[in-house]
Every structure is written in structure tokens, then in C-alpha cells.
Image: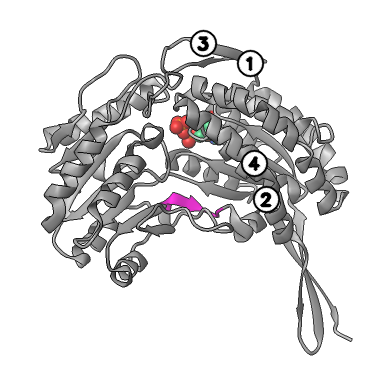
Amino acid sequence: MATLVSINPASGEPVGSIEAALPADIGHVVARARAAQPAWGALSIDERAACLRAAIPALKAAAARIGELVTLEMGKPAPEGKGEANYAADGLAEEVDEIVAALRPQELRDEHTLTTLHHDPYGVCAAITPWNFPILMPQQSVLPALVAGNTVVLKPSEETPLCAQAWAECLQAHLPPDVLQVVHGAGDVGRALVRADVDLIVFTGSRATGVRIMQDAAEGLKRVILELGGKDPLVVLDDADLDAAAAFAVRNSFRNAGQVCVSTERIYVHRAVAQPFVDKVLERTKALVQGPGTQPGVTVGPMVNERQKQKVLEQVAAARAAGARVLAGGTDAPGNFVPPTVLVGVDHAMDIMREETFGPVACIMEYGDDDEAVRLANDSPYGLGAAVFGGDLERAQRVARRLSAGMVGINRGCGGAQGTPWVGARQSGYGFHSGPAGHRQFAQLRANSRPAK
Ligand code: ADP
């Protein structure tokens, strides 16, 4: 065992520490999960769901403290940290209901045959989660895995171990031993978990780590669900409501200091409305308040760590050197802070328009017609989310249908109605989660058939 110290990115001070695993410990943890699985899998789906619902009062009671830990460990503004913890607790019942409904057996019948489709557990699930939504990501990974009858070993991000631990303990109190275990540590512990005797790996994180996980999973043909990064475009058509488009651009570029997989990372605005749109973006950017997430009124916190900060600054510096103009931010700030930055004069030769930034940077590029907007928006190996803003909904819809993203929002963000999967196209994902179609990916489908009469 080792010790993992969690650092507050706003102050550099420790938040606390927790016992971490060594890669060599993981085999034993997974063996316990394996031993606990048959009994857990033998419960009915309603019994398993009941165990999870029983945790709701504890999650609600702990939400304020968990939210505070989220802010301290990764920096997001306090209302957003608490909001995340509350959203997770308040949404758990509905989420579990949706999972149960998705995993109930389904019947197919024709003249000769009655077939039942069963959604059975895979066995042991490894859930490896990031720090940017350190409660919601574990929840989205762990709930469907458990309801499906798998046992779970969760490895939360090494940046946010304490809030994830506090969240998991609320569930563990209502689960049989070893059904949900948590191991802490960095990538080496995650890697050991992927290589251990697990059947399903559910991962949310960077594309690079997703590739490594898939390689490690390949030998055992382990199932993987990989939710990876994005380089989400926003297309602003010439008939768009520019106030709404600018409000969305600023909110979605700078929310969580840009550390969101569906952040707006590229903005394409029609030439005819570029100037007023840029002016509105700048006005709204100037109204943002940056500081420690614990400070009242702060809307943009720090980068999660120094490495992330340097990555963002390097991309901005390289874009600048290649001719981009900085209209806001772009300066260095103390600690892990990167001021909300607006760039124009960008092009696709620049890294900042191709590689995921994961920071508070809005890059605005002009285009001439719908075809060009579509071509630019699709000029990326990623395909997670996208947004189109336009006055004529039919036209905006036509543009949206031509975008290669998994989730496209028109005059709004990419999140859909209840039941919508969280799905990335191209290199933004492999498998997907959420919504009935996503929940079913956590279960082995088995078809049992018999004569119809
Ligand atoms: P970031 O660098 O922004 O934290 P990652 O995608 O590297 O993004 O991390 C997401 C999660 O994946 C974290 O919990 C991290 O510890 C874990 N991780 C990192 N490398 C590996 C790996 N090779 N195998 C399994 N998990 C890993």
C-alpha cells in the first residue's frame, strides 16, 4: 500500500490523503470481486436495484460535503461542485429505474419460435474514471454495471480520490461486501486493473489512455466501453440569434475551465456575422470571474494541475506564433490558473484546432457558406458533441445531420432528452453508455429460444 495525497489546484495545498493501491495489490482486489460476483449476480435485478436505491438518503445527506470535496480537489466553483453531488443523488432513483427497464428480458416471437433475450452479468467490471466530473462519471459507470449483476472495482482519478471515496462509501454501506470496491492510484494502478482478471472495462478519459486500455484489453478480448475526448465544433449560421449563440459559446467554452469532454473547442461563424458575434463573446468573457472555486462569485476555477495548464499555454503560444490573435486572456496567471482566452485568426494547421485543449480557450474561425462550415467542423478525428445555432430550424437541422459527431445540439448543447445515450463517433469513443441502449452494453446478451407452441 502507498499514500496518495490530494492537492487543491487553486492553492497547491493538500486537501487530504488516502491509502492507495500498488499495482501488485490489484490481483487480490479483483479476486475478491470475482468471489463476490456469483451471489450478487444471483439476486434478482429488483433486489440489486433496491440496494442502490437504499443509498439515496446517505448520498443526499453527504452531498454538501462531497460537493465541497469536488471543489477542493479539482477546482470547479462551489455551486457546480455541490450541484454535481446533488444531481447525482437526486438523479439516482430515475437512473436506476431506467437501467432496470433496459435490462429486463425481452421477448421475440414468430410463428415457430419464442426467443427471450436475457441481459446477464459479464462478471467483474473495472471502472476507470477521470477528475473533471468526479462524481457523475463514477456514477454513470458503476450503476449500470452493478444493476446488471457485475461486481465492480472502481479506480477514480488520482486527482479526485477523496470525493469519489466519499461517494462510493454511501453505496458500499448498502451493498454486500466486495460488490463495489475502490482502489486508488495513478495510471499504473489503472493499468494493473485492466490487465487483471476483469471482464468489462468502462473508461472515461483521454484518447491516448483509451488506446492503451484497448491494447491491454485485446489479449483477453475483454469488453471495453471507452468514452474519450472531443474537439467539439460550434457552427454559428448567418441567421443565428447571436446573443444566444455567444452565450452558449462562452458558457460551453469556459464551463469547468474548459475541462469538459464536450466543451466547445472550435467555433465557426459565418463571415457576415463574425464581428458582432466576436464582440458579444468578448463582452461575456469579460464578465467571467476567475479564482478559487471556494470563493463566492467565482465562475471559472483553475486547471486541475500544472501539467494541464502547461499543455493549454503551449497550444495557445504555438497558435500565436503561427498568426492567431488573442482578444482576451492569453496571459500567464499565478498557480494553475489560465485566464479565459479568446483567439481569432486561427486555422486548421494549428494544433489548437486539431488536438483537444481541455482548457478555457475559445477559438473563433470565419467561414463562407454551409458547405465550408460542415467541412471545417468535420475536419477532426474526434466526433463527440457538436452544436449548430441558426434561425431557420430546417436549415440548421440539415447542417446538423451532416456533422460527424455522435451528439449534436441545435440552438443548445449536445445533451439530449432523458434516455439519450452519451455517444461519441469516430475517435471519441468505442462503445457508449447511458440511456437504455447504453445500459445494455454493461450486460452479456443471451438469446434462449424454444418452440412457440
Ligand atoms: P488525465 O491525464 O487527464 O487524468 P487520463 O485519460 O490519463 O486523463 O486518465 C483518466 C483515468 O485513467 C485516470 O483514472 C487515470 O489514472 C487512468 N489511467 C491513466 N493511464 C492508464 C492506463 N494506462 N491504464 C488504465 N488507466 C489509466
Q: Is residue 388 visible?
A: yes
Q: Which residue is mark 3?
A: 14
Q: Looking at numbered disc 3 in the image, what kind of residue is underneath it? A: Pro
Q: Position of residue 100 (x, y in %)?
A: 74, 56
Q: Looking at numbered disc 1 in the image, what kind of residue is underneath it? A: Ile
329 left or right, relative to 158: left
Q: Which residues are magenta?
A: 427-432
Label 4 crowding class (10 Å Cα cut-off): few <14, some 14-19, many 20+?
Answer: some
Q: Position of residue 175 (x, y in %)?
A: 81, 36
Q: Does the magenta-highlighted stretch encompass residue 323?
A: no
For residue 40, above or below residue 268: above
Label 1, secondary structure: give it: strand
Label 2 crowding class (10 Å Cα cut-off): few <14, some 14-19, many 20+?
Answer: few
Q: Which residue is mark 1?
A: 18
Camera-near label (3 vs 2) is: 2
Q: Which residue is mark 2?
A: 94
For residue 246, above or below residue 106: above
